Amino acid sequence: MVSTPRDRAASLETALATALAAADMPALQAVATSLVDDSLALSASVPLLARLVAAVPSLPEPVAIAVAEHVLVAVGARVPSFEAEVTGLREKLAAVYEAQEGWAAAAATLRGIPFDGSHTLSAAYKLRVQVKIARLYLEDDNTVEAEMFLNRAAPLLQDADDQAVALQYRVAFARILDAKRRFAEAAMQYYSLSQLPPGTTAEVTADQTMEALGFAVRCAVLAPAGPQRSRILSLLWKDERSRRLDSWAILEAMHCQRLLPPALVATFAETLAPHQRATLADGETVLARAVVEHNLAAAAALYVNIGFAELGELLGVSAARAEETAAKMIQEGRMKGVMDQVDGVLEFDTGADAKEAVLQWDAQIASVCAELDSCVEAILTRHPEFALVAANGGGTADAVEHAGRSRV
């Protein structure tokens, strides 16, 4: 006797219930294969597949992963017929991977959702999931993939009314800037997050805003020395909350343009994240480079000029390294100065105000000299005999002295 489609659907429903109750992985995979077979009417297969997908979180993790992955492979090219079920299954499977801290696997599972080919997924859903993928890749230290998905999500932000997702986007964006060592920009992003009023979303608490402020200070310290970093340091230093941070000492020292002692730098280094302790191509750490540049900028406030050998000793580096750092900072417009490589001297540009003061001093000296010349000319005009004394080698001073004796 040939079974009818209704009989087959009923048989699969019974088999599914039995397999779910026993968490029988092979049986569940067999049922799933039958459910996505094109010989079974969608009116029967879709509800049963939806029931299987809904039960995945309640299965033991190994069974849930095996069954979910089997379904995704078995569906194959029929994804459009089971779009909602497959999308839901990918979210549930990603949640299982995330619970196991399998960040890359969770992200790869979610990125299989047809964001571009689907006409049923809302813009809000696409924004939420793409931001989620970016955050998962960040947990896996994969900045490239994280940035790609964050860029995809960016156009959807303008129509988003979910503050929680918008906040997650901003946090992910700040983390990407931080990971890419664009520390000045990252510091401003973190500081902006730290200013959110607690309660803006469930994730915004006083502790979270203080944590964001701490991240802002770390990034500001690691940023390249120059006017931009000085403005950020000033902003952070003026924030009363910064005084409660462990990094307050180094923040204050940098803002006040003090030379950083090694002990203070070593204490701050312990607070850095692994990527912030990375060694650069020249063999120097990010922090070491930032400290050398800061101390060089601080030296500009203490010295008018300094030899490269003395500068290297001051910075704790070789004379060649000091010269190279100074040249780079001057070239990039982060410090004003002139380098005399012949004499091995760095002359700091003390700024427009100091230049104006020097010019005024020179003008005053020139004015005094001009007045003195006028006085001498008047004396010689009235007493021509003084000119004879000067002509005989006595000079103007002797002539004036001779005039004094003559009067006596």
Image (cartoon, grey):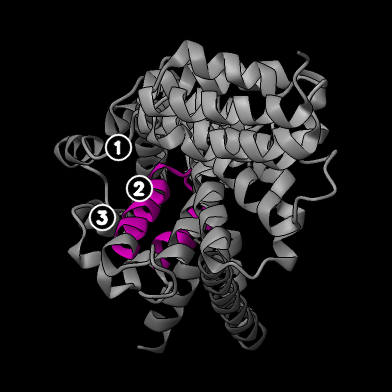
Cα distance in 3D space between marks 3 and 1: 18 Å
**Residue that mark 2 sits on:** 218
Decide which of 322, 390 is in the foreground and name it. 322
Residue hosting label 3: 253
Mark sitting earlier along the chain (2/3): 2
Question: Which SS class for mark 3?
Answer: helix
Determine crowd level at label 2: few under 14, some 14-19, many 20+ residues with C-alpha closer than 10 A: many
Foreground pick, 287 / 399 = 287
**Given contact means CB atoms under 8 Å apart, are the residues at marks 2 and 1 in contact?**
yes
Is residue 160 rendered magenta in the image? no
Say whether disc 3 or disc 1 marks the residue closer to the N-terminus: 3
Position of residue 132 in the picture relative to residue 406 (left or right): right
Q: Amino acid at mark 2?
A: Arg
Q: Where the N terminus falls, by quadrant?
A: top right
Q: Is residue 302 above or below residue 209?
A: above
Which labelled disc corresponds to residue 16?
none
Which label sits in the foreground, 3 or 1? 1
**Residue 154 image point, x, y percent:** 71, 53
**Of helix, strand and loop, which one carries label 1?**
loop
Say left or right for 270 vs 345. Answer: left
Q: Magenta region, mostly helix, strand or loop?
A: helix
* Residue labelled with disc 1: 272
